[in-house]
């Protein structure tokens, strides 16, 4: 009995043969396929693959498409992988076109509960046929094409089944913001690769408020900012006032800006996905960065040292990044549940337009620690050692020091003397200034 070359089972065999064929053989088969009007699956386009397996005329084919951030495509690809595995041999895999075989890529899921880095292989470019009774009551094809100039996830169906396809696509997209998204609620690092934003899993943040010594009135401002994501979120939403907020944290180096960002991010883990933007993504891909909120739902975006990227229009340099920032942050107001935190050493270096309320609703300045605060910082670092140290006297010796400076004095004492040192030894380190990082300005031949 001769197998029908158009049947799903035989087309799979053809794919296996083509995988080992030379380029010349592929070209010859393509011509033969065109002559008989039935190209092999690995040569056929996704549309041809779909019409063949759906058993419809090409003019009756409908495509229900979603084009979104690259991370969305990777997560949707992971969901497609799970559906392919669930329905097993009933699913047939086809080529993305151009005579290429189906391609797969790696999705990094970060560390598991045992501290082992986990990666899964997800569809990158392919089309999959799901017979009736698998994904839906109707037979459908699912196409994924994760290239930076394409980034398409589509349901291919008969025109008569377009409503079913639209419902399926909506279901896939809704799952992005659920527990089906393995990256949702985690801390991610954003970078630019192949001209688009890529995110990778960053180590978890576990910074607590008790570890950062700041004035009480400043903490009250932070609580007001967080209320948009917690206690006042639903009230703001019901009144149509929006739940997206922006916070600019200013202050000299070493006063705890990054630590404060970590405390805020840690308080939102699970509820919000935190995206840490690097300089390249801030400078060249801000719009794509904020579009990632479509992938994760509630999102916290962190723009560290923003003054190094944006600058001021009066500086006379390239203001492209500034223009993108102004346009993007205004657009964010139309998105709910997007929090932005930016840090800067010098708010005066930022263009005034970047600081107005449509971009940042709140601006807080972290002060240099006073003597009581320096004493508390010393106590926090010295307490585990159980030493007899006059903290207030030591704090007076460190006038003008930041929290990071105070920490470094303790680190220096431990490096020089180990776990046991005297008040006199610690005072010597504090007054000598050798804990400071200094640059030798002398010239050498």
Image (tube, rainbow, N blue to C red):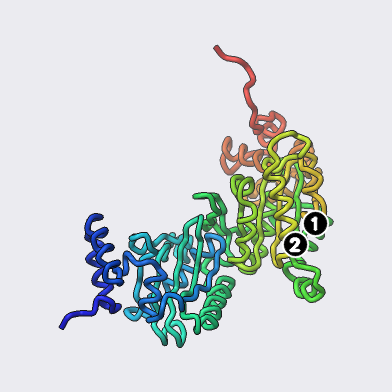
Nearer to us in this view, 66 or 307: 66
Quadrant in the picture for residue 251: top right
Residue position for label 2: 333
Residue contact at pointers 2 and 1, CB within 8 angstroms: yes
Residue 189 versus residue 435 in the image, above or below: below
Quadrant in the picture for residue 440: top right
| Residue 257 visible to an observer of this rendering | no
Could you say where residue 93 lies in the image, as x and y percent from the top left?
A: 35, 71
Residue furthest top as drawn: 445
Identify the residue shown where x is 46% and y is 80%.
158
Quadrant in the picture for residue 362: bottom right
Could you say where residue 166 lies in the image, as x and y percent from the top left?
A: 55, 78
Residue position for label 1: 358
Identify the residue shown where x is 39% and y is 73%.
128
Alpha carbon distance from label 2 to label 1: 8 Å
- Report crowding for label 2: few under 14, some 14 to 19, many 20 or more residues within 10 A (C-alpha): some
Secondary structure beneath dot 1 equals loop
Identify the residue shown where x is 40% and y is 74%.
50
Could you say where residue 258 lies in the image, as x and y percent from the top left?
A: 67, 49
Residue 397 versus residue 2 in the image, above or below: above
Residue 249 versus residue 62 in the image, above or below: above
């Amino acid at each position: 009995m001769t197998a029908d070359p158009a049947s799903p089972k035989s087309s799979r065999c053809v794919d296996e043969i083509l995988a080992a064929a030379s380029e010349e053989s592929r070209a010859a088969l393509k011509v033969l396929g065109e002559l008989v009007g039935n190209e092999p699956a690995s040569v056929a386009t996704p549309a041809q693959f779909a019409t063949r397996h759906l058993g419809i005329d090409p003019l009756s084919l409908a495509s229900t498409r979603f084009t979104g951030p690259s991370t969305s495509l990777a997560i949707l690809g992971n969901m497609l992988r799970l559906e392919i595995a669930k329905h097993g041999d009933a699913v047939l895999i086809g080529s993305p076109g151009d005579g290429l075989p189906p391609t797969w890529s790696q999705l990094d899921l970060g560390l598991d509960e045992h501290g082992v880095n986990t990666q899964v292989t997800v569809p990158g470019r392919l089309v999959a046929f799901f017979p009736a009774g698998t994904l839906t009551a109707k037979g459908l094809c699912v196409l994924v094409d994760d290239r930076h100039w394409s980034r398409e996830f589509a349901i291919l169906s008969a025109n008569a089944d377009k409503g079913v396809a639209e419902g399926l696509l909506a279901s896939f997209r809704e799952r992005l913001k659920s527990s089906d998204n393995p990256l949702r609620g985690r801390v991610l690092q954003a970078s630019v690769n192949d001209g688009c934003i890529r995110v990778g899993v960053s180590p978890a943040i576990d910074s607590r408020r008790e570890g950062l010594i700041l004035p009480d009135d400043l903490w009250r401002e932070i609580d007001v900012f967080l209320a948009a994501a917690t206690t006042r979120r639903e009230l703001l939403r019901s009144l149509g006032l929006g739940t997206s907020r922006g916070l600019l944290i200013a202050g000299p180096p070493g006063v705890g800006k990054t630590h404060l960002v970590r405390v805020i991010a840690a308080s939102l883990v699970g509820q919000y996905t935190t995206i840490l933007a690097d300089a390249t993504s801030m400078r060249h891909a801000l719009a794509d960065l904020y579009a990632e909120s479509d992938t994760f739902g509630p999102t916290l975006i962190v723009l560290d040292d923003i003054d190094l990227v944006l600058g001021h229009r009066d500086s006379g340099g390239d203001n492209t990044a500034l223009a993108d920032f102004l346009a993007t942050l205004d657009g964010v107001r139309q998105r709910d549940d997007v929090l932005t935190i930016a840090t800067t050493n010098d708010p005066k270096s930022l263009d005034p337009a970047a600081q107005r309320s449509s971009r940042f609703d709140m601006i807080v300045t972290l002060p240099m620690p006073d003597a009581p605060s320096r004493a508390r910082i010393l106590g926090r670092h010295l307490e585990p050692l159980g030493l007899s140290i006059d903290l207030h006297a030591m704090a007076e010796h460190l006038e003008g020091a930041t929290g990071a400076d105070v920490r470094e004095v303790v680190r220096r004492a431990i490096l020089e003397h180990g776990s046991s040192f005297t008040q006199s030894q610690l005072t010597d380190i504090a007054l000598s200034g050798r804990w400071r990082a200094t640059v030798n300005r002398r010239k050498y031949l």
